[in-house]
Amino acid sequence: MTRILGIEGTAWCASAAVHDTASDETFIESDAYEPDSGGIHPREAAEHMREAIPRVVAAAQQYATETAEEADPGIDAVAFSQGPGLGPCLRVTATAARALALSLDVPLVGVNHMVAHLEIGRHRSGFASPVCLNASGANAHLLGYRGGRYRVLGETMDTGIGNAIDKFTRHLGWSHPGGPKVEARAHDGEYVELPYVVKGMDFSFAGITSAAKAAVDDGVPVSDICFSLQETMFAMLTEVSERALSLTGADELVLGGGVGQNDRLREMLTAMCAARGADFYAPEPRFLRDNAGMIAVLGARMYEAGDTIAVENSRVDPDFRPDEVDVTWDAQPVASAARRHPDGEVRGAEATVELGERVHKRRVGKPYRHPELDERLRAERTRREARLTSLARREGVPTPVVYDVDDQEATLTLERVGTADLREQLAGPHVQAVAYHLAACHAAGFVHGDPTPRNVRVGDERTYLIDFGLGYHTDHVEDFAMDLHVFEGALAGTSDDADALTATFESAYREAGDVAVVERLREIEGRGRYQ
């Protein structure tokens, strides 16, 4: 039996917990910071931590004493949120954890807050190796285990989803947190179009928030904007989650983060997983919002694996990315396998493909999306795929011949090319060819939009790009660099040799394309959440 006392204090919630591995029971005591107006103020939040953490830790210690089999409360280690988060809050939390570990003469365990959001869902669901969608105030990203670490498969390129919603509600003069208020007002709203920005498995909320503010200022009813914010943002998160399941071959999805308490988001994810035969799990609300229970649960796994830290090495990291954590406990990689049906269909993230002498592709309707949004996206993407596939071919990029297109039915008839997805034959020459092909597309003034190993076909002599549905015309180096970012992120999630393949890919792109694009890629990586 292991008993871990966990302490959480990354931003707004001071929390302490005791987790008992024998009974699998977790006691949690929390005290949330509530600003008088606006969003979280780091200085005020840190002051709250200084006042609240001693109280919640005392409550956890009292619970440990009262439930101990002997006089000794039996705390084996103290776990704390080492990052990411607000620096002032993290430092208060770490100081309390160090002092407590020293006073109890037990080891210290430094826990990554975002990995804890994933692991609490995996622990309580019993899933072996799920994809995790973290949807919280400062974060929104997809994680999957590969090569000893949780890899970031996709993430917001600007702001976390909770913060994006809060920016809109502050514009209305509503207090923090804004999410529950938007959810309440959305019940009376109707759909209006807002920007929908998905690039591979990455996404952006900044433009949606700006458009929502402008719409309210122009007189659009607040309830309609609240409804449409949820329909748009949550559909984006659900779409990229499905893309991650398709890319990795996983059939399990867990949800983490405080925004995961939203009924509409959980409804969308449940519908998506049901439609593709995947399992979905969302922990109960006390484990979704920031809490020390998840810190204690992951702390127990790390402690049992011998993954503790000395006090002198326990410095906090406000930018602690989940893909920087060496996983020492019992995580398992997903088994990559395309979803093939008995009738010969292959199911991707947004379409079913019938394989014969020719390929018949149909973008299926998504029951989780609002009908107007779903119809618009399916038609737009079908037209784009047909147009850009043919354009790329004229620019010398190997692509399928487009024989027929029906954007109303969202169907395409295409030449059958290659013998396997790149995901099944990841090798240097194929990756090099992808770089050459993307460079040619960029030189012609358009991007692929979703260049993952599922959207590249390989044959005996040629490597083909397929599925240009997320592509568009552009002359911006930022957009070209995002193509590279998407491909490299997908490599990290599907290959155990991602570093070498990435080096080969970038070297080939430098040779065939504009070096400025690779330089901008470095900037984009630096702008990623907690980079």
Image: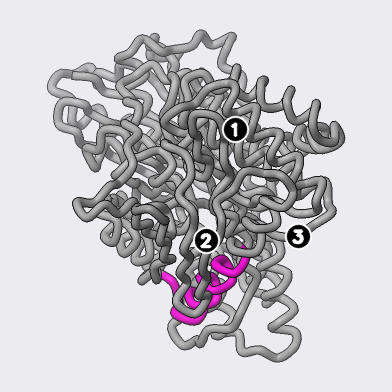
Q: Which x, y percent locates residue 296?
A: 35, 30
- Graded by Cα atoms within 10 Å as few (under 14), some (14 to 19) or many (20 or more), the crowding at tag 2 reads many
> Is residue 318 at least partly visible in the picture?
no
User: Label 3, label 2: how many angstroms apart (C-alpha)?
Assistant: 21 Å
In the displayed structure, would residue 113 be above or below residue 427?
Answer: below
Question: Which residues, given as a range, are shown in magenta?
Answer: 369-384
How would you classify the magenta stretch by its main secondary structure?
helix
Name the mark nearer the viewer: 2 or 1. Answer: 2
Mark 1 residue element: helix
Secondary structure at badge 2 equals helix
As helix, strand or loop, the secondary structure at mark 3 comes to strand
Is 492 placed left or right of 77 in the picture? right
Q: From the viewer's side, name the closer residue of 10 and 431.
A: 431
Q: Quadrant of the C terminus?
A: top right
Q: Residue furthest front?
A: 357
Residue named by callout 1: 90
- Res. 92 image quadrant: top right
Residue 320 drawn at (x, y percent): 60, 29
Question: In the shown orientation, is residue 284 left or right of residue 11?
Answer: left
In terms of depth relative to the viewer, which is nearer, 460 or 322?
A: 460
- What residue is rendered at 63% in x and 24% in y? 502
Quarter of the figure with the N terminus? top left
Q: Which mark is residue 413?
A: none
Q: CA distance from mark 2 to mark 1?
A: 31 Å
Mark 3, mark 2: which one is toward the viewer? 3
Tag 3: residue type?
His
